Image (cartoon, helix red, strand yellow):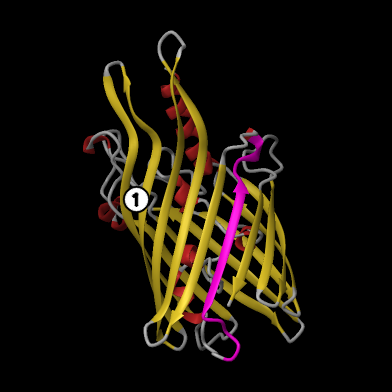
Amino acid sequence: MKFLSLLLMIVVIAFLMSPVFAQGEATVLFLMINPGARQGGMGEAGVAIADDPNAVYWNPAGLAFQYENPETDKKFAGSLMHVQWLPQFNLSDLYYDFGAFRYYWQDIGMLGLGIQFINYGENIQTDVTGAEVSRFNSNEVAVTGSYALKLKHNLGVGVGLKFIYSNLSPGIFVDNEKRDGRGSTFAADIGALYHPGFAKKLSLGMTISNIGPKMTYINKSQADPVPTNLRMGLAYRLLDSEYNKFTLVYDVNRLLVHRDAEKADGVLKAVFYSSWTDAGVLRRFTHSIGGEYWYTDLIALRAGYFYEDEDFGGRKFWTFGGGLRMSIVGVDFSYIYASVEDHPLSDTMRFSLSFSL
């Protein structure tokens, strides 16, 4: 059955997409595709520089600092991104879209909305003779609502609640048994952003994202966890003058999921205990480092590097990018370069459009 081949292909694609090399431990790995061409140009780092609408994904606490001066800051802002995913596979209908929006509500705080969508394209189910039985599209989507506020003038916190829907295949029969490749669940994100008073040019950020119950497709005994992820990082403004600004950013990521030969642990056990008992616990962290230069808040240049340990995925690539701001509109782009031939992420181009009103 080509349906079984389809499921295998989706597993392989999801495996390659995960920036933390999930090793088949989690499902709905599209949640781990890092959106935003701006952050994509800085080695895919951004937890401590969450100062645009993409903070809904990177660190919801960053939303708390985005409306501080009513004379210059805008109450509403948004960002949109489209990317042809895994270009080395030459699959025209494999793409990823992301949208983020934030709005300041007087006396309540900053609200955010994020939408993630990945399309796997059209697939064909055949019978044992090779005759076509049906055609169907596979895709996944997540919608996140966020809220952020300041606990102190230099400390913000944020939360996000998301609904996740996975539509890999409709209910079809395989060997007289109905298999349904559709499932849904929910999850939460929590984040903090701190600007320490002892170092005014420094920002520290941390998030734990996708905290939620397992995703069930066929039955609960075969449920898979969502990719709960810990992200920590810093941003330091090395240069901050009227015409020239340069910021250095650094993030680390760690998947907080644990699976043994029989089943995967629940989210609380994995987050607080079992994921930290795995072999090579420190080597399971990925590292992202990058820099962003702005000239007169008009033109930006970016570069970065992503590193993953050889035993836990071994992905290494450089990123480059730039941006242009004019009045209320901005355009950003980023490019991934991998020296390894036929690297699935190599030549990935991200384009983002941002706006504020």
In this view, the residue in front, 92 or 247, is 92
- Name the residue beneath numbered marker 1: 275
Q: Is residue 74 magenta?
A: yes
**Where residue 135 sits in the image (x, y, percent)?**
46, 26
Which quadrant of the rendered structure holds the N terminus?
top left
**Where residue 67 sits in the image (x, y, percent)?**
51, 83
How crowded pointer 1 is (Cα within 10 Å; few <14, some 14-19, many 20+) is rated as some
| Above or below, comparing residue 327 to residue 174 in the picture | below
**Where residue 2 sits in the image (x, y, percent)?**
45, 20
Name the amino acid, label 1. Ser
Which residues make up the magenta segment? Answer: 71-88
Say which element carries label 1. helix
Residue 111, quarter of the rendered image: bottom left
Q: Is residue 87 magenta?
A: yes
| Above or below, comparing residue 106 to residue 93 in the picture | below
| Above or below, comparing residue 117 to residue 40 in the picture | above
Answer whether residue 174 is visible to the viewer in this image.
yes
In this view, the residue in front, 327 or 300, is 327
Answer whether residue 26 is visible to the viewer in this image.
no
**Where residue 201 sits in the image (x, y, percent)?**
60, 82
In this view, the residue in front, 85 or 125, is 125
What is the tally of numbered marks visible in this picture?
1
Instruction: Answer with left or right where residue 346 lies relative to residue 261.
Output: right
Which quadrant of the rendered structure holds the C terminus?
bottom right
